[in-house]
Image (cartoon, rainbow, N blue to C red):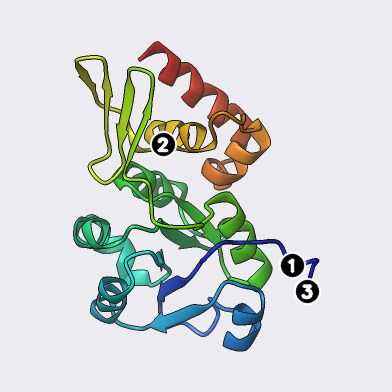
Amino acid sequence: MSDIPRTGNARFVVHGNSTDILRGSFAEFRHAGVPITMHSEIVGALADLAHDDDASLILAGGEAFEQLSAILQIAQPVCSGSIFLGVFDTTATATIASAMKAGVRGTVRLPMTPQRLRDVARLHPRTGPIERILTIGELTLDVPHRSLRWRDQSLLLPAREFELLHQIIRAYPESVSIDTLALAFGSDLEDPHASVRVAMTKLRAR
């Protein structure tokens, strides 16, 4: 068991009804430290989140793309965990970009395997209650409201830049490698490292 990475208290609620979004049994996911529950209806998935607000939500159902903004508006207040979009190789780049802009934390490649979810849990560890307000010096990040304050100024950040800063602040005083950031926020792009560098440049400018 020592070769299984520590993933904190990761649990994933999956919305989807297609048989090709999972590769592995529920027992295999539990054994890997990333238990999942499946819901074919989004109402059931959101109800599950309401009972365990530290769980993370993976939207892998086709209708989730069409109702994404409405789903996120409901899910974000009750979900202290992250919200991810399940994507196939055929998922349109525009769909992924819209999801990131709407507030999705990142993507999960489908079909999901225990190893892929372990990688996600490593990048977004659940080691205890979520830190809702993060402060470093005169910089304050309000995670639930996705807002940023610098001294007495409020700053608005696009979703990708907000998550980039969130990842960096959570790791402080340790640094985060560009490989980690690229995997977390650019896995859906042709050149994720370049995407992270561009987002970092914009973040510094703000």
Q: Characterize the local packing of mark 1: few (<14), some (14-19) or many (20 or more) Cα atoms within 10 angstroms.
A: few
Taking the spot 55% from the left edge, 41% from the top edge, the residue there is: 186
Q: Residues within 10 Å of mark 2 (few under 14, many from 20)?
A: many
Q: Is residue 43 left or right of residue 56?
A: left
Whether residue 23 can be seen here: no
User: Which residue is found at the position 53% from the left and 77% from the top?
Assistant: 35
Report helix, strand or loop for mark 2.
helix
Determine whether label 3 and label 1 are within 8 Å by CB: yes
**Residue bearing the label numbered 3:** 1
Q: Residue at x 57, y 72 (%)?
A: 34
Query: On screen, 154 above or below 8?
Result: above
86 vs 93, nearest the viewer: 86
- Residue 125, image quadrant: bottom right
Nearest to the eye among marks 2 and 1: give it: 1
Asked if one can make out residue 114 in the rendered structure from this viewpoint, the answer is yes
Helix, strand or loop status at disc 1: loop
Badge 3 amino acid = Met
In this image, 53 relative to 174: left or right?
left
Q: In front: 1, or 14?
A: 1
Q: Earlier in the sequence, mark 3 or mark 2?
A: 3
SS of the residue at dot 3? Answer: loop
Q: Nearer the viewer, mark 3 or mark 2?
A: 3
Q: Which mark is residue 36?
A: none
Q: Position of residue 149 (x, y in %)?
A: 26, 23
| Number of marks present in the image shown | 3
Q: In the image, 102: left or right of 87?
A: left
Q: What residue does disc 1 label?
A: 4
Q: Which residue is mark 2?
A: 160
